[in-house]
Amino acid sequence: MCLIVFAWRPGHAQPLIVAANRDEFYARPTLPLAQWPDAPHVHAGRDLEAGGTWLGVGAGARFAALTNIRDPGQLPTFKSRGELVARFLIGDLSIADYLNDVVPRAVEYGGFNLLLGDGTQLWHYNARDARPQQLVEGVYGLSNAGLNTPWPKLLKARAALSEVLHDPHPQALLALLSDPQPTPVAELPDTGVGLATEMLLSSVFIASPAYGTRASTALIVHADGTRQMVERSFGPHGGHLGEVELIV
């Protein structure tokens, strides 16, 4: 998952609103959003190569999502970051206990940002930081750096989310995730991947022959615990493959 914008509003009728794009190579085998047969309380997409996921919900108002940290110089690792989301959704550890387990082992994975929620709290952990942080009410964005790192596409998507919070609905969230406009060259961040790749990765919605936005997900959590999720799947060049809607 490479872009997540979200509003955390404890005490509101809709305390958590999430709009997220998962960017990945199209060749990586994936299942769309669904109930997991081996963990029926989990609803998420699934990475068939490693078995994990990038965003989902579980029992007891559990929510988790992940983005990678872009760092061309980081050493290869042998553990899939998607298992960090899956293990939280499948399990029953509190957020604090789960993070106490994850933080000492963060070096076993490539760089990552992890969001964890339980309906009453929302936490963020960046594997490059010493400590996780509990989030206060606000509108946030994550891409492939730190929380609210001001990359142009993050700022654009976060502002677009703020504009629809008066009446959030899945189609509005999916619309803001579909913006294909690249960032002007003068405003591009320099993350060490070269100008052509920086340009490709600079749009909210990414499309190319081999790599791009594979899934756009809208999640609305209601105060009574009901979660409404809509996911659109995409293939090469941004071709639309299908849409799934769940209320759990």
Image (spheres, rainbow, N blue to C red):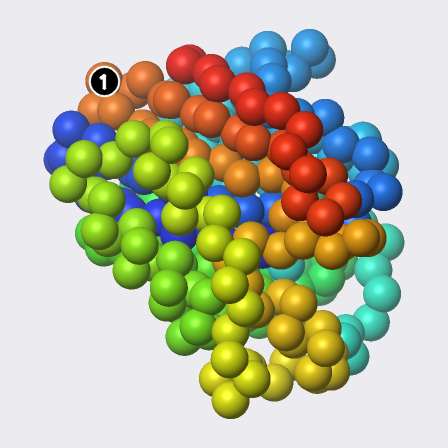
Q: Secondary structure at mark 1?
A: loop
Q: Residues within 10 Å of mark 1 (few under 14, many from 20)?
A: few
Res. 200 visible in picture: yes
Drawn side of residue 15 relative to residue 26, left or right = left
- Name the spot of residue 200 as percent of width and height, x first: 66, 67
Quadrant in which residue 228 is drawn: top left
> Considering depth in this image, is 67 or 244 the residue closer to the camera?
244
Work out whether 169 lies above or below 28: above
Work out whether 104 lies above or below 30: below
- Name the spot of residue 176 as percent of width and height, x first: 40, 48
Q: Residue at x 64, y 48 (%)?
A: 213
Q: Amino acid at mark 1?
A: Asp
Q: Residue at x 82, y 53 (%)?
A: 210
Work out whether 69 lies above or below 211: below
- Name the spot of residue 170 as percent of width and height, x first: 36, 31
Work out whether 179 lies above or below 165: below
